[in-house]
């Protein structure tokens, strides 16, 4: 897959994954999540989206070299998500005027990592199988 298409697919998939995470979190707290609430879901996801979009490239989460196979993809995604969560926590605290309870960040780390790794793992398998067919 050409590098531009690959990067675009990863970016869009990551954004959707983090929006899904925010929608799940909002739903678990009884907040609106439907199409009319997209702006609120986006605002909820924004600190962690920014954290991811800043951290992920620094840790190679979009690089074909560091995400060449599913295990490498999952390792790179996990490492980048640690940095993204920390940065996202600071951005969120700046937005709302305080840090949340530790449990919020713990759940955010686990659930968002699961969603990101699930999506990116599938992408890596799909990409790996596609490249096997070209050999």
Image: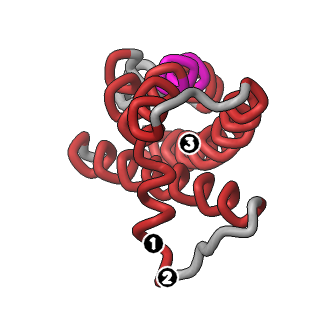
Nearer to us: label 1 or label 3:
1
As drawn, the label of residue 38 is 1
Q: Residue 23, located in which quarter of the rendered image?
A: bottom right
Nearer to us: label 2 or label 3:
2
* Distance from Cα at disc 2 to Cα at disc 3: 25 Å
Residue 81: % across, % down: 54, 26
Which stretch is magenta? Answer: 78-85
Residue 77: % across, % down: 55, 27
Residue appearing at x 51%, y 57% in the figure: 19
Q: Callout 1 environment at 10 Å: few (<14), some (14 to 19), or many (20+)?
A: some
Instruction: Determine contact: label 2, label 1, CB under 8 Å.
Output: yes
From the viewer's perspective, is 103 left or right of 10?
Answer: right
Considering only order in the chain, which callout, 3 or 1, is on the residue closer to the N terminus?
1
Task: Give the residue at mark 3.
Answer: 120
From the viewer's perspective, is 24 left or right of 92?
Answer: right
Residue appearing at x 29%, y 50% in the figure: 8
Q: Is residue 67 above or below residue 23?
A: above
Residue 54: % across, % down: 32, 27
As drawn, the label of residue 35 is 2
Q: Residue 4, located in which quarter of the rendered image?
A: top left
* Distance from Cα at disc 1 to Cα at disc 3: 23 Å
Q: Secondary structure at mark 3?
A: helix
Q: Residue 68, can we see it?
A: no
Give the main secondary structure of the magenta stretch: helix
Instruction: Determine contact: label 2, label 3, CB under 8 Å.
Output: no
Residue appearing at x 62%, y 28% in the figure: 74
Q: Is residue 63 above or below residue 18?
A: above
């Amino acid at each position: 897959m050409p590098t531009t298409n690959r990067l675009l697919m990863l970016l869009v998939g990551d954004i959707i994954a983090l929006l899904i995470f925010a929608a799940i979190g909002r739903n678990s707290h009884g907040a609106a999540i439907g199409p009319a609430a997209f702006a609120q879901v986006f605002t909820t996801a924004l600190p962690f989206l920014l954290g991811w979009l800043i951290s992920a490239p620094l840790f190679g989460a979009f690089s074909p070299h560091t995400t060449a196979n599913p295990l490498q993809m999952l390792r790179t995604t996990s490492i980048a998500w640690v940095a993204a969560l920390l940065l996202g926590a600071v951005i969120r605290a700046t937005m709302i005027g305080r840090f949340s309870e530790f449990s919020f960040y713990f759940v955010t780390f686990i659930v968002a990592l699961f969603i990101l790794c699930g999506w990116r793992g599938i992408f890596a398998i799909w990409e790996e199988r596609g490249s096997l067919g070209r050999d």
